[in-house]
Image: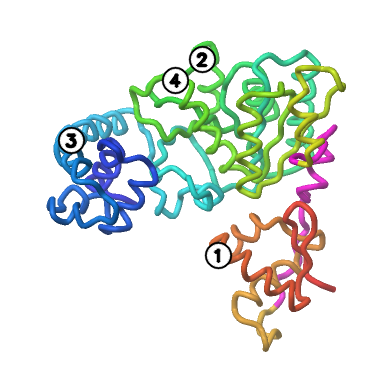
Amino acid sequence: MLNPEQLKYVIALPLLPEVGLRTARALIEFFGSAESVFHASREDLLAIPNVRKDTVDAMTAAMGKALQRAEQEMAFIGKNGIRTCYFEDSDYPYRLRECVDAPLLLYCKGNINVNCDKLLSVVGTRMPTDNGKQLCRQIVSDLAEKTTGLTIVSGLAYGIDVTAHKAALAAGIPTIIVPGHGLDRIYPYMHRQVAVEALKTGGIITEYMSGTEPDRQNFVARNRIIAGLSDATLVVESKQKGGSLITADMANGYNREVFAVPGRPKDATSAGCNMLIKQQKAMLVETADDIIAAMQWKKHERKEPVQTEIFDDLSDEDAAILGLLRSAEDGLHVNQIVMETKLPYSRLTSVLMMMEMRGLVRSLPGNIYKAAK
């Protein structure tokens, strides 16, 4: 967890000219911390591979102003009870951390558990049909009834987004809002009450500082957070082009499951969903049961953990994973195994692959793993 002084420099770093997300992370890796970048000499900055002299001059000239703006943001954070998550913090969303373009810093408001058992993003058109809205409400409601530990993620936009948030609230489950602006506003404003209700058990997450306008490019960029936060993304009604298809593509890029509700062949409102299914970029979904079956989202009656001492030829990691899987008859999703074992996602998938090759575990559709019989 960053102390206030460290946080100030992390906030200020992306404000420097020509320092975007990837450059900021590269600078932190090169110098060891954001603070060290600001304390580095001009010669040290020029020693960065492939950096131009005019870039260094622009960065050094802007450091004072960037730190001043960061101090203003610190005051805003403190006044409004906003929590920050740095990408190296233990409470940073572990699903999102695995994404190559994960935000450096997140601003969070509410009672958010970003590392809960099940996270489903629900996206779609801003102009849905009545049937589309009803299907969205029904699927979310049925998922809430038939599973435990579920949180719904969306972007609070008109149409399917706000329908999904409202359905989650009505079902008594948490919902997370990912806006394309800072936490000093709610857009669209008419959805403010939905956001207020979401804060009670879920909340709002953004990578944007206060004062950031809800510009179109911000909403496109925030879609990667919606996709990256979640185990899977559900698309309910989408035209052939639009933000929900961008989110689906991003989810596919992160190796997350994508689901789509089909529509009639010549229905423009469902053209995007039909295309995703036809191109095998999404699994066809008609009911909540389809998602539950694909993701193996069931209540698991856990048996007593198997004593790892009996696995003489296994590593501690192998034994812990195998014991966990043997206590779950229906198997476990890879994200559940991450939560239980505390292993990094990349390390866990590598271990599981080796265990599968040795015949110790079996992989099933939907990133489910079971102990071999």
CA distance separating discs 2 and 3: 33 Å
Residue 324 on image: x %, y %: 69, 68
Task: Looking at the image, tell me whether mark 4 or mark 1 is earlier in sequence order.
Answer: 4
Q: Residue at x 81, y 59 (%)?
A: 330
Q: Are marks 2 and 1 in contact (CB under 8 Å)?
A: no
Q: Is residue 313 left or right of residue 289?
A: left
The residue singled out by tag 4 in the image is: 214
The residue singled out by tag 3 in the image is: 62
Tell me the SS state at disc 3. helix
CA distance separating discs 2 and 1: 39 Å
Is 170 drawn above or below residue 233 in the view shown? above
The residue singled out by tag 1 in the image is: 343
Residue type (three-letter) at the residue carrying disc 1: Leu
Residue type (three-letter) at the residue carrying disc 4: Pro
Residue 188 numbered tag:
2
Magenta span dominant secondary structure: loop
Q: Residues within 10 Å of mark 2 (few under 14, many from 20)?
A: few
Q: Residue 103's quadrant in the figure?
A: top left
CA distance separating discs 4 and 3: 25 Å
Tell me the SS state at disc 1. loop
Q: Residues within 10 Å of mark 4 (few under 14, many from 20)?
A: some
Q: Nearer the viewer, residue 370 or 55?
A: 55
